[in-house]
Image (cartoon, rainbow, N blue to C red):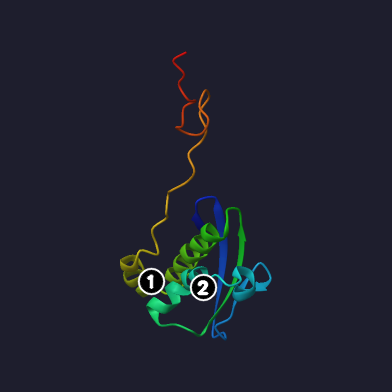
Amino acid sequence: MGRRKTAVARVRVFPNGDGSITINGKTAHNYFGQRDTHLAAVAAPMRVLDLNNYTLTVRVVGGGASGQAGAIRHGLARALVRLNPDFKLALRKAGYLTRDPRMKERKKPGLKRARKAPQYTKR
């Protein structure tokens, strides 16, 4: 399980695979389209550990593309640590095991957004 913003990803890692990544029934390239940054974020934990013989299947819901890519990266890093605890040090050092807690702040009553107040008029 990986999370970022409001996105939640369930990642399954299969050893002795062909290196393919399936996200919600589509290939990673089809799912994220031309966004190379999202594809790079998803594959980052594998690149850090220099692995390419695992097959990944991912179910991700909520958030946007960037949040989903971050959630997948977080979930993949956690799954790899479960698979082999020796990976933990390298993934922790790269920052992939840390949950990114930044979320949209809730709107407060009397305000237009979370912190923006209505414009003040003197007369």
Real-space Cα distance between discs 1 and 2?
A: 29 Å
Left or right placement of residue 21 versus residue 101 in this view:
right
Can residue 110 be seen by looking at this rendering? yes
Q: Disc 2 residue type? A: Asp
Instruction: Judge the density around disc 2: few (<14), some (14-19), many (≥20) Cα neighbours within 10 Å.
Output: few
Q: In the rendered image, which residue does mark 2 sit on?
A: 36
Residue 91 sits above or below residue 47 on the image: above
Residue 121 against residue 11 in the figure, above or below: above
Q: Tell me where residue 74 appears, x and y as whole percent.
A: 46, 63
Q: Which mark is residue 85?
A: 1
Q: What residue type is labelled 1?
A: Pro
Residue drawn at 52 percent across, 23 percent down: 110
- Residue 103 is situated, as x and y percent measured from the top left of the image, at 47, 46
- CB under 8 Å between discs 1 and 2: no
Question: Dot 2: what SS?
Answer: helix
Which of these two is toward me, 44 or 109?
109
Which residue is more in the foreground, 41 or 8?
41
Which structural element holds mark 1?
Answer: helix
The label shown at residue 56 is none
Q: Which of marks 1 and 2 is in front?
A: 2
